[in-house]
Image: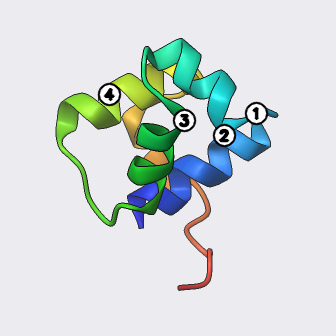
Amino acid sequence: MLGRKLKAIRIFRGLTQEQLAEKLGMTSQQVSGVERAESMNTSTLAAFAKALGVTEADIYAFGKSLPE
């Protein structure tokens, strides 16, 4: 669920996986893997939040009505 929220926020921000990967110092394949994850460690979540310009709380709250 968190990965799907990160992907939705990335798209909302108008970023490609490649652009986000560059901000994070990762490969686009790593970004893709995180976006498919159901859960992640707090340091990964914090890094994505910072790169996307949101808080971790924003990520948890984003799209509460997204379909499963």
The residue at which mark 4 appears reads as 46
Give residue 42's quadrant in the image: top left
The residues tagged by marks 4 and 2 sit, at their Cα atoms, a distance apart of: 14 Å
Give x and y (percent) for residue 15. Answer: 74, 31
Which amino acid, mark 1?
A: Arg
Which amino acid, mark 3?
A: Ser
Which residue is at a point 50% across and 49% down the rendered structure image?
32
Looking at the image, residue 31 lies above or below residue 47: below
**Which is more foreground, mark 3 or mark 4?**
3
Looking at the image, residue 7 lies above or below residue 29: below
Looking at the image, residue 22 lies above or below residue 68: above
- Residue 60 showing in the rendered view: no
- Residue 29 showing in the rendered view: yes
The residue at which mark 1 appears reads as 13
* Mark 2 closeness class: few <14, some 14–19, many ≥20 residues within 10 Å: many
Q: Is residue 6 left or right of residue 30?
A: right
